Image: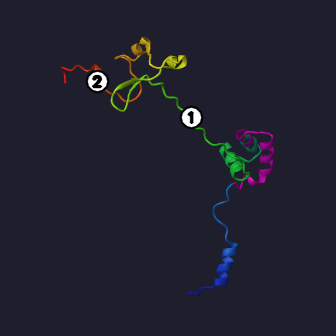
């Protein structure tokens, strides 16, 4: 066997090229075209279709990633959807007593303690609300327990 020669290893390292091509190697020649199209407010899809028609097949996702990473375009943060919760009609306080909350009608008119019979009819024994199903003690028959 031959001995280790650092000079030949350094020469091999200098000539080394990675097997995997660099990212966006195919889009690099079209950089100026992409910049010009983005300045004209072209969409990623429109740019991808134009480049594909002119012998550079690519996708809109590749164009978007190229614009964000190479051209430094900013990305919009993802919007969180705010789910509106239904207005609570009744609940229990910390000491176990039932409390009534303001209905939207009572809240707008300033009447804090009053609830309408229409609201009670909607939330009667047959009406189902969202959330866990909790037994209503006042509706249980005392003879069955």
Decide: is 105 above or below 60. Answer: above
Q: Which residues are magenta?
A: 24-47
Quadrant for the C terminus in the image:
top left
Q: Regarding mark 1 in the picture, which secondary structure is present there?
A: loop
Q: Main secondary structure of the magenta part?
A: helix
The image quarter containing residue 130 is top left
- Residue at 43% of width from left, 22% of height from top? 89
Q: Is residue 76 visible?
A: yes
Residues at badges 2 and 1 in contact (C-beta under 8 Å)?
no
Mark linked to residue 110: none
Decide: is 133 above or below 40. Answer: above
Mark 1 residue crowding within 10 angstroms, few (<14) / some (14–19) / many (20+): few
The image quarter containing residue 82 is top right
Q: Nearer the viewer, residue 53 or 142?
A: 142
According to the image, label 1 marks what residue? 81
- Residue at 60% of width from left, 38% of height from top? 79
Mark 2 residue crowding within 10 angstroms, few (<14) / some (14–19) / many (20+): few
Cα gap from disc 2 to disc 1, whole angstroms: 36 Å
Q: Regarding mark 2 in the picture, which secondary structure is present there?
A: helix
Of the numbered discs 2 and 1, the one sitting upstream in the chain is: 1
Mark linked to residue 137: 2
Measured as percent of width and height from the top left, residue 113 is found at: 44, 19
Q: Is residue 58 visible?
A: no
Residue 2 is left or right of residue 30, and the answer is: left
């Amino acid at each position: 066997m031959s001995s280790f020669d650092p000079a030949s290893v350094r020469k091999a390292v200098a000539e080394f090229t990675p097997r995997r091509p660099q990212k966006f190697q195919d889009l690099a020649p079209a950089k100026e075209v992409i910049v010009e199209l983005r300045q004209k407010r072209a969409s990623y899809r429109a740019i991808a279709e134009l480049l594909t028609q002119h012998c550079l097949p690519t996708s809109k996702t590749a164009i978007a990633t190229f614009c964000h990473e190479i051209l430094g375009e900013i990305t919009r943060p993802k919007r969180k959807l705010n789910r509106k919760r239904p207005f609570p009609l009744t609940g229990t306080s910390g000491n176990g007593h039932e409390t009534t909350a303001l209905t939207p009608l009572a809240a707008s008119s300033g009447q804090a303690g009053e609830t309408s019979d229409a609201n009670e009819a909607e939330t009667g024994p047959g009406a189902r609300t969202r959330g866990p199903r909790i037994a209503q003690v006042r509706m249980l028959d005392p003879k069955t327990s």
